[in-house]
Image (spheres, helix red, strand yellow):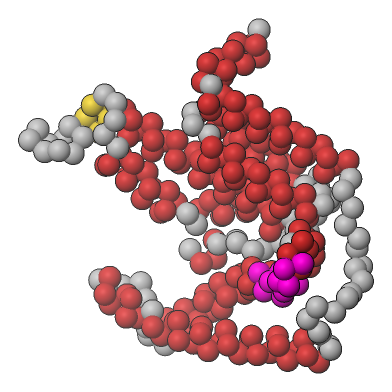
Amino acid sequence: MIKDITIGQFFPGESFVHKLDPRAKILILIVFIVVLFICRNFFSLLLMLVFSFTAVILSRISPKMIWKSMKAIVVLVIFTALLQLIYNDKGDVWWKPFPNGSFVITSGGVYGAIFLIVRIITLILLTSLLTYTTSSTLLTDAIEKLLTPLKWLHVPVHSLAMMMTIALRFIPTLLREIDIIMSAQKARGAKLDTGNLGQRIKALVSVFVPLLVSSFRRAAELATAMECRCYTDGAHRTRLRRMRLGWRDWLAGGVLLLVSATAVFTSFYPIGSTLIFQAVIS
């Protein structure tokens, strides 16, 4: 399971999505997430899902990598879907397993569970592309540029951007470290995969203590390396690559605005989805 987590990894490429300005990617992602949680019906949600799939295809990222990012949240998706089935009692009753009990499966519960699953899948598809197609250096520069207005309030923008990017960058490193420590402890006879829940939690202490020590050591080494290279927070630096918005960024932003406007319209005016659907098929 640890090996399947791909959060924070970067896969170099020359695809359409790779060549987008990192600032445009972040803004597109923010707008996408806001609109995604505004969606109230399957038609509007389908529009956002199609946008996500299109972005994945244009990124040329291996479907195997995309599946790994989805595989890591399967348990969470199933759990949230079950909560919808259990606690959502709206709509018609489809199944009542206990005649004298209060637990029932309703059409509203099934609708809510499916809607939630599709929404989470849509969200993960696009958010994972941000780190898959953007290096940590460009991500730091983009965050710093977007937060530049906060400098007027004396907010340490560069430090915040650096901390966020370093934290994101070290997620794959920590995951690899966990895998190495678990393999080493199993080789020494540790039973990490057997026993009841309490025994497994107790056995994980032998994993997290070395991981904590290793994390502090890596942080100290990184700080020493930055000091040796005369790194100074807030110093005015030049950039190897100047970020400029190009036609790809305007095209991607325009398509997102069109899709978002349609999704919001059909969410608040459900009859609009019927009219749009009829116009498309005719």
Residue bounds of the magenta highlight: 152-164
Q: Nearer the viewer, residue 194 or 224?
A: 224
The mark total stands at 0
Name the dominant secondary structure of the magenta segment: helix
Q: Nearer the viewer, residue 131 or 13?
A: 131
Residue lying farthest to the left in this orientation: 100
Residue 261: horizontal and vertical position, in percent?
66, 30
Residue 181: horizontal and vertical position, in percent?
50, 81
Q: Residue at x 80, y 78 (%)?
A: 234
Is residue 61 in view from this perspective? no
Left or right: 115 as drawn, with respect to 203: right
Left or right: 122 as drawn, with respect to 157: left
- Indicate yes or no whether the magenta region holds residue 163: yes
Q: Quadrant of residue 137?
A: bottom right
Q: Residue at x 57, y 54 (%)?
A: 69
Q: Quadrant of residue 140?
A: bottom right
Left or right: 138 as drawn, with respect to 212: right
Q: Residue at x 17, y 32 (%)?
A: 96
Residue lying farthest to the front in this orientation: 153
Residue 104: horizontal and vertical position, in percent?
21, 35
Q: Quadrant of the C terminus?
A: top right
Residue 193: horizontal and vertical position, in percent?
35, 72
- Indicate yes or no whether the magenta region holds residue 180: no
Residue lying farthest to the top in this orientation: 282
Q: Residue at x 44, y 40 (%)?
A: 116
Is residue 74 in view from this perspective? yes
Look at the picture and state if 179 lies above or below 82: below
Look at the picture and state if 50 lies above or below 215: above
